[in-house]
Image: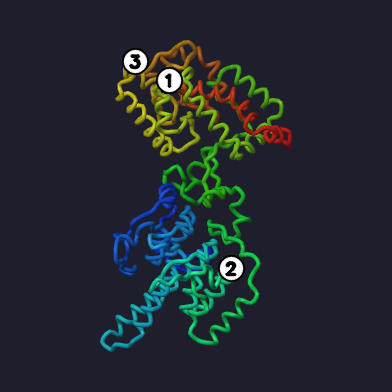
Amino acid sequence: MKTRLRYGLRLPAQVTMVAFSRLWIGSLKSACLLQVHPASQLSSTAATPSSAELYEGYSFLHLAIDLTDPPFACEAIRHGTPIDQKSGRGQTPLLHALERLRELRAVLKISNISIPSLQEFQYKARLANLNAIDRVRYIIRVLIAQHADVDSTGTWKGGKVVSSLHFACAMGDWDLIALLLEHGAKSKPTPACADAEDFLMEATDKRRFRDMKVNPRTSRPPRLCPCFSGKPRINCHSQRLPYPDDFTCSCGSTKAYGKCCKGRNIDLVEEWIDETQTIRLVRETVISHTFRPPPFMSPEVMETIMNEVQNNKEKFTKMMQDLMWDSEFQSVYAECFDIGCQNDNITDPAFRFAYSETKFFPFPQGRSSSKHYCRQKQKEWNFAVDKYIAGGTDSRPRLEIETAAKIGISLGAMYRACEADGCDKVEGRELEKVSTCSRCKMTFYCGPICQKAHWPTHKSICGTAEQTERPLPSQVAVSNFVSKYGPALTLYRMGSEYLEQLLEMD
């Protein structure tokens, strides 16, 4: 069985699986921005270092080149490894790959010397070496297509300052020479360099090289998208694109996104970030056409929102969807949430502490997120609450603090309480066990009397997509704070741009 990568190299499917598969999407995306010391992980085909210092500054791309592993290199690029991060030797991945290619070719020449007693071994060694050469050449072409710096320089034998074009000329690799020139490589990128032409041995080769430089391109070919669609980035992830259904879901469940959070009203979209030169994954809640504000919001806030919805539901939905995709709008509302969460007058001190520790605002999810995602967030948040309690600064009983600040599996209140108006009995405190609504199984009561009294209010939300678990009082307070002050802060921060977005709704 073979798997075809988008750039055209055919590799065994089992090799493709080695390359930090989509299962690693969360950890690899973060790790790709870090440096590693992979000396202990190198295969027998990797160059033997003279010192551990050689691996200082190594990125996953440098490691992929040492391992001659194109899928690994592609995954590293896909998840944000810096294309031009230099190693401790001052080599970018492109320079490192070209030096690796030259080493492999030198080994190939030696293996071509026939030794009768080692013919079978030599044959296998040559075959392995040829495969390694093809794999490294593939990585080089990928790096160039991803706009790696073709004029970056490093030191070589005898302290010579060389660039990518010098290596290509030294090997007499005319395909790579042509590709580098097409991408704007200079034959003498710095005064410290000799002319790359000097690395060609034959006079005919020197003339050929000069002829190739006669009509240089005025601009570099467009960068191909690091998602490996084969399209230029400007025609691909420069716009927001939906996360593929068959990729592993970002919640960490290990399921395919199409069979996980996509069915829970969660949109995963990808966008290119110029500042970091990476594709960022954004997790967003879909605003349905039957939008209703959460039932726990204050009557004043709920009335304001519902008036806007009823005036023109289609326009309101479109406006909210457009604004939720606006990075400036998102940053303004994140600021508003931050202000609300740290407001002494509306949030519990244990809640404030947990927020400051996690920098995450928990919000009751209903059935809109995977259990794995919610369980991870619950664990992080409740650990912070336990840390607050252990600090001993709060004289309240432990149960009271936990009731006010700890969250459950769906990120609402952890301690279940009667939700009838005027009743605040809590399971484990006044109640041994609460009763559950048999229809939605998300609303709890102290008994049948409260359940019957609350039914006229509960029936409008029971079992709907908007229904969530009971929130903490601090969650309600922050939500109301953001709903009340968010629009004013948005107007202040975004000004006329925000107004124009409202006026231009179709």
> What is the quadrant of the C terminus in the image?
top right
Alpha-carbon neighbours of circle 1 within 10 Å: few (<14), some, or many (≥20)?
many
The amino acid sitting under disc 1 is Asp
Instruction: Say if 164 sits above or below 364 in the image.
Output: below
Q: Can residue 203 be seen in this view?
A: yes
Q: From the viewer's side, name the closer residue of 333 and 447.
A: 333
> Which element type, helix, strand or loop, lies under badge 1?
loop
Alpha-carbon neighbours of circle 2 within 10 Å: few (<14), some, or many (≥20)?
some
C-alpha separation, residue under disc 3 versus residue under disc 2: 73 Å
Furthest-front residue in view? Answer: 191
Contact between labelled residues 3 and 1, with CB atoms less than 8 Å apart: no
* Mark in front: 1 vs 3: 1
The amino acid sitting under disc 3 is Arg
**In this picture, residue 494 sits left or right of residue 200:** right
Which residue does the numbered mark 2 point to in the structure image?
Answer: 184
Q: Which of marks 1 and 3 is nearer the N terminus?
A: 1
Q: From the viewer's side, name the closer residue of 409 and 26.
A: 26
What percent of the width, then of the height, locates residue 171?
A: 46, 78
* Mark in front: 2 vs 1: 2
> Which element type, helix, strand or loop, lies under badge 2?
loop
What percent of the width, then of the height, locates residue 203?
A: 53, 87
Instruction: Say if 172 sits above or below 135 in the image.
Output: below
Task: Look at 34% across and 82% down and name the residue there.
Answer: 111
Instruction: Say if 10 sits above or below 267 in the image.
Output: below
Which residue does the numbered mark 1 point to in the structure image?
Answer: 348
Q: Earlier in the sequence, mark 2 or mark 1?
A: 2
Q: Residue 429 carries which label?
A: 3
What percent of the width, then of the height, locates residue 108?
A: 38, 80
Q: Earlier in the sequence, mark 3 or mark 2?
A: 2
Task: Look at 58% across and 60% down and name the residue there.
Answer: 223
What percent of the width, then of the height, locates residue 159?
A: 40, 71
> What is the quadrant of the N terminus in the image?
bottom left
